[in-house]
Amino acid sequence: MTAPHGVGIGWRPEIAGFVAELPGLRFVEVIAESVPTAGPPPDDLVELRERGVTVVPHGVRLSLGGAEPVDPARVAHLAAVAQLLAAPLVSEHIAFVRAGGLEAGHLLPLPRTHEAVDAVCANIARAQADLPVPIALEPIAALFDWPDDELDEAAFLNEILERTGALLLLDVANVYANARNRGTDPVALLDRLPLERVAYLHVAGGAERGGFYHDTHTDPIGREVLELLTELCARHRPPAALLERDGHYPAAAELRTELDAVAVACGFPVVT
Amino acid sequence: MTPAGAGPAGPTEPPAATPVGSLAARQAELVAALVADGPPPPGFAPGPLAAARAALLRKRAGEVARHWPLLAAGLGPAWPTAFSEWAAGRPGGGGFRDGWDLARALRTRAALPPLGAEELAVREAEFRYDGHRAPRRRRSPALGRAGGAIAVQVAGRVRLLRPARP
């Protein structure tokens, strides 16, 4: 099964028709939790697979960064989806989504402490033991930091990648969002990350609200994010880049323009 | 939308020099502060935390609108505020149940728009939902009613018999 390459798009039921008609598409992602494993996968995904399109299950609710051990049933589901779709790898986030019996409803950042690194590495190892394919880890966009951070972002991520041997799913929009909200230089972070370990990139749009840049996935990709993507690919171009859109879907022509912009920024063939 | 820095008003404990407690306890405290009106954990900057709280509510509103498109459409421009006012401090139960709970709450206050009433009537006919556990598909025929709308379900097929009162 082919590793992700070229320009991809996050497959969502709302844009399944649009995605099915992209002539050059070789790679999509699907939200792992949305794929049932009791029966056959959704027809649209089966058709993409039959066309030779790589489908990567992207988990959003494993909570690898939770202090408690990762739920084996959730790992088993992710593993089953990977098998069902003959995926070459899966991806998840360096984040936690629940604690103390409450669901946060979204990805929350870990404290960048040695204690948290130990906890997340233990959970990644548990997941890796039960997954049939490699896992790529995605650093998230965080609106806040913990007060007791001991490591900076690059040291935190490098420590986790080194200890787990995992691949990196680098979200350029997240790098941009964090740097902008913290007042740091996004390129300086890129310089300290192992770009050769990037399985693929994420790119998405965001918006400024109340003094914060939000990684919304419902707005167009901004110029700054595309410039950062260009900058990254000029340093070391990863094998693939995927556009994430999660609502407020624009007209097909606009979505095609975004996919083309990602292709141009990376120097990949257009898929539209 | 909550502006930056509009965290909970009033005095808070001074930031602790060294945060105490295990990672598990501190993560639980943080999630409670973000979704269940828990006290702000010591040491966190209030502005960014308030922004995160508002972002989580927006994310939930989007998920509920995906499961309850007619409810959201019926409320129109009032939807984000209606959802946020209802959901603030109330932990999420997933988009399907959150929307159901919100629709019932609006019905109680006679604030459910006709489109939302029709959607609720259809869902009540399709599923048995006690407000505590996940809704279960009904096996026997049933009627669902809300705001004058009546839906009937027989053998798993649902039809709206009567539209809601405008």
Image (spheres, rainbow, N blue to C red):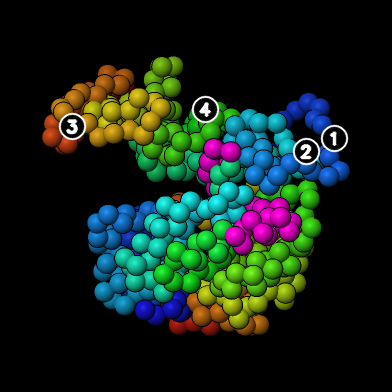
The residue singled out by tag 3 in the image is B139
Q: Is residue A87 above or below residue A37?
A: below
Magenta span has A113?
yes
Q: Which image quadrant is residue B47 in?
A: top right
- Name the residue rendered at 59%, 73% in the picture: A165
Q: Which image quadrant is residue B21 in?
A: top right
| Mark drawn on residue B86 | 4
Magenta span has A210?
no
Which is nearer the N-term, disc 1 or disc 3? 1
Which is nearer the N-term, disc 1 or disc 4? 1
Letter of the chain that mark 3 sits on in the rendering:
B
Graded by Cα atoms within 10 Å as few (under 14), some (14 to 19) or many (20 or more), the crowding at tag 2 reads many
Q: Position of residue A37 (x, y in %)?
A: 31, 56
| Mark drawn on residue B42 | 2
Which is nearer the N-term, disc 4 or disc 2? 2
- Discs 1, 2 touching: Cβ within 8 Å: yes
**Amino acid type at image mark 2:** Pro
Q: Which residues are magenta?
A: A100-122
**Secondary structure under badge 3?**
loop
Q: Is residue B101 above or below residue A145?
A: above
Q: Which image quadrant is residue B34 in?
A: top right
Is residue A215 in view?
A: no
Which is nearer the N-term, disc 1 or disc 2? 1
